[in-house]
Amino acid sequence: MRYVNFETENLIVPDEFFMAEALKEASQALKSDEVPIGAVVVFNGRIIGRGHNLTETLNDVTAHAEMQALTAAANYTGGKYLKNCTLYVTLEPCVMCAGASYWTQISRIVYGASDMQKGFSNIKQRIVHPRTEIVHGVKALECGKLVKDFFYTKRNKS
């Protein structure tokens, strides 16, 4: 695992840096013909969990990028709570993934592109933990383009 000290490397913006890491995970999903969504969980400037969509590969509707990253982070910490951690994900989490993040008590969720159809922010009741900070729009164009291009290609295959 790579550790970055953002205090001494002040030209690096942490949210952008870690979203770029989530985009690398999304690229792994794309290589497997999965919906290209990636996620990483960060604690103290260190990635402790990574994940990308594996729903087709595992034939499992719950194998979303966030679920993979949250599980990996919990395994790393040896506990189910991810307080003081940040989840970076390329697309706004769905209701299932937001609900899972609630139970981890994760401190922050940072996502790139919004999901106007299936994203958790469309739900009227709060489904993320009340103390979880939500940041959206980090590398949104890049994150959104990856997903849009994937579905455009799928729809227009001959």
Image: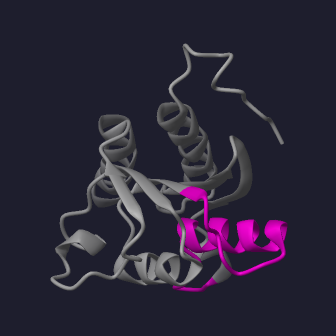
Q: Position of residue 52 (x, y in %)?
A: 60, 60
Q: 98 and 157: which one is in front?
A: 98
Q: Nearer the viewer, residue 152 or 21?
A: 21
Q: Give the range drawn in magenta.
A: 59-86
Residue 54 found in image quarter: bottom right
Relative height, residue 114 to residue 66 (above, below):
above
Q: Quadrant of the C terminus?
A: bottom left
Q: Which residue is drawn at 27% across and 81% down?
A: 126
Q: Nearer the viewer, residue 54 or 130?
A: 130
Up-down relation of residue 16 to residue 75 (above or below): above
Question: Is residue 54 located in the magenta-colored stretch of the structure?
Answer: no
Residue at the spot 58% in from the left edge and 78% down from the top edge: 104
Q: In the image, what residue occupies the spot 37% across and 51% down? A: 147
Q: Quadrant of the N terminus?
A: top right
Q: Specify the quadrant of the image occupied by residue 120.
A: bottom left
Q: Is residue 80 found inside the magenta-colored segment of the image?
A: yes
Question: In the image shown, does 31 or 128 lie closer to the viewer?
Answer: 128
Residue 119 location, x and y as percent? 28, 70
The x, y position of residue 18, in whole percent, is 57, 39
On the image, the x and y values in percent for residue 70 come to 64, 70
- State how the image is colored: one colour
Is 126 placed above or below 151 here? Answer: below
Q: How many marks?
A: 0
* Residue drawn at x 64%, y 50% as measured from the top left: 28
